[in-house]
Amino acid sequence: MHILFLTPGFAVDESDTTCLTYFQNYLHGIKLHKPNVKFSVLALHYPKEAKRYSWFGAEIISLGGANRPFPSRFYIWQKAIRVAKSLIVEKKITILHSLWLKECALLGKYLAGIYDLPHF
């Protein structure tokens, strides 16, 4: 099982314990109690720098959207779809999990429809 989390932001690195603490704790819990479950995190806006990095062994992809206003936000959505599509194929993603009922949920629903994946 491999879960792709779609979120507006995530910790900059392993020492950033104040960014979405509950989400970080949730991911630590998955690693602790379900070590066979893999996950990747696709962060749309934060960190503000576009980069790929490892967070306690998990792959984090930051698109560096920096909460840009519309219409430039559509560019980040296109980039998110492109990156997510490649992750779904490469890593054989089995579940999409979107955080918050905004743009991540919209993107998750769209991707789940294309790839017939469960979406939470």
Image (cartoon, grey):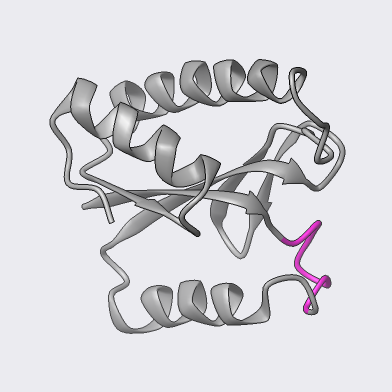
Asked if residue 14 is among those painted magenta in the image, a careful observer would answer: yes
> Horizontally, is 107 left or right of 65 in the view?
left
Quadrant of the rendered image containing residue 90: top left
Quadrant of the rendered image containing residue 116: top left
Residue 64: x and y, percent?
79, 34
Residue interval drawn in magenta: 11-17
- Please determine whether, in this image, residue 110 is positioned above or below residue 57: above
- Please determine whether, in this image, residue 50 is positioned above or below residue 29: above
Residue 28: x and y, percent?
50, 78
> Horizontally, is 73 left or right of 1 in the view?
right
Q: Residue at x 28, y 62 (%)?
A: 37
Task: Name the residue furthest left.
Answer: 116
Q: Residue at x 37, y 39 (%)?
A: 108
Q: Residue at x 64, y 49 (%)?
A: 8
- Please determine whether, in this image, residue 111 is positioned above or below residue 2: above
Asked if residue 75 is among those painted magenta in the image, a careful observer would answer: no
